[in-house]
Amino acid sequence: MRTWKLTLEYDGTKFHGWQDQVNARTVQGDLLKAARECFGAEVEIQGAGRTDAGVHAIAQVAHLRVFHSNPIVDKLRAPELKRELNIRLPGEIVILDVDEAPNEFHARHDAKSRAYLYQISTRRTAFSKKHVWWIKERLNVKAMSAAAKLLEGRHDFTCFRALDPSKPNDSPVVVVESATIEAQGHLILFHIKASHFLWKMVRRIVGTLVKLGSGEISEQQFRGLLSGKCDSGLDVASWTAPASGLFLESIVYTEDLNENRKGSDHRRRGGAAGSSPTNAH
């Protein structure tokens, strides 16, 4: 068995999200198809985060695991794998980097934190319509920035989540490491980093911050929502920002895969093709 860490970017506009589905085009599905063609064998691909339909990624991370040895699996190096996958992938998906990884590496379980970027445009744009949310109303960026800082720390995000049928018992409590809003020309950029995120949490936070920036709700009301006490008069779900402006920006790991890669190379040169496999997580 061999395992690689893949770093990739994608435009999610034409995909029904990350996760493989039987009757819909997904990023994971296209990756699986490309990897199976490359190796001529069954593979496992798991991502660090499940992006929804229409959401993009600047640096998504996934692990690619091949369970059965053959001449292609045994000899393929990381730069060659990167080239072979990119040849087979559509233009909306690009492999940015490939690293050898220990067989125990799991892209989702081993991630320490994740960061998202949301882009709001204050004007109509011809070139990046698919990648922004155009807001016609004037927004108070200073007020939005002050509210964004309130997100930092440990909070109950019940008011900003959508119930995930696949994780009905997930805690609504999330520790946010950082959250900022800044204006760059006609763009308002919202950055948020946390150990994990709840379904639709980021898009609902953005929608609520826009309501605050337009003066429709107060900072006090925002604080109330952040305490987990949902105001029945505030329909946060209907404020969910569109997927077009959301990007998975980065995944943070503490492990140094460079040392692990050297170990993998050493084991392979020593004739590891016949060694017993390590169980995948």
Image: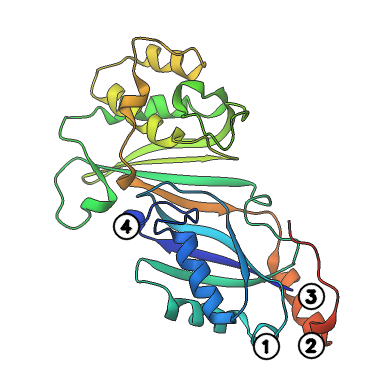
Check the image and report above or below for 142 versus 27.
Answer: above
Q: Report crowding for label 2: few under 14, some 14 to 19, many 20 or more residues within 10 A (C-alpha).
A: few
Q: Report crowding for label 4: few under 14, some 14 to 19, many 20 or more residues within 10 A (C-alpha).
A: few
Residue pictured at 46% horizontal, 52% vertical: 249
- Give the distance between the C-alpha atoms of the residues marked 4 and 2, in whole angstroms: 42 Å
The picture places residue 69, in percent across and down from the top left corner, at 72, 81
The secondary element bearing badge 2 is classed as helix
Would you say the residues marked 4 and 1 are in contact, meaning their CB atoms lie under 8 Å apart? Answer: no
Would you say the residues marked 4 and 2 are in contact, meaning their CB atoms lie under 8 Å apart? Answer: no
Of residues 220 and 75, the one nearer the viewer is 75
Q: Nearer the viewer, mark 4 or mark 2?
A: 4
Left or right: where does residue 107 sit relative to residue 20?
Answer: right
The picture places residue 38, in percent across and down from the top left corner, at 54, 81
Q: Nearer the viewer, mark 3 or mark 1?
A: 1
Q: Nearer the viewer, mark 4 or mark 3?
A: 4
Whichever of callouts 4 and 3 sits on the residue coming sooner in the sequence is 4
- Residue labelled with disc 3: 263
Query: Quadrant location of the N terminus?
Result: bottom right
Residue pictured at 59% horizontal, 30% vertical: 168
Q: Report crowding for label 3: few under 14, some 14 to 19, many 20 or more residues within 10 A (C-alpha).
A: some
Q: Amino acid at mark 2?
A: Arg
Check the image and report above or below for 165 versus 80.
Answer: above
- Give the distance between the C-alpha atoms of the residues marked 3 and 1, in whole angstroms: 15 Å
- Residue labelled with disc 1: 75
The secondary element bearing badge 1 is classed as helix
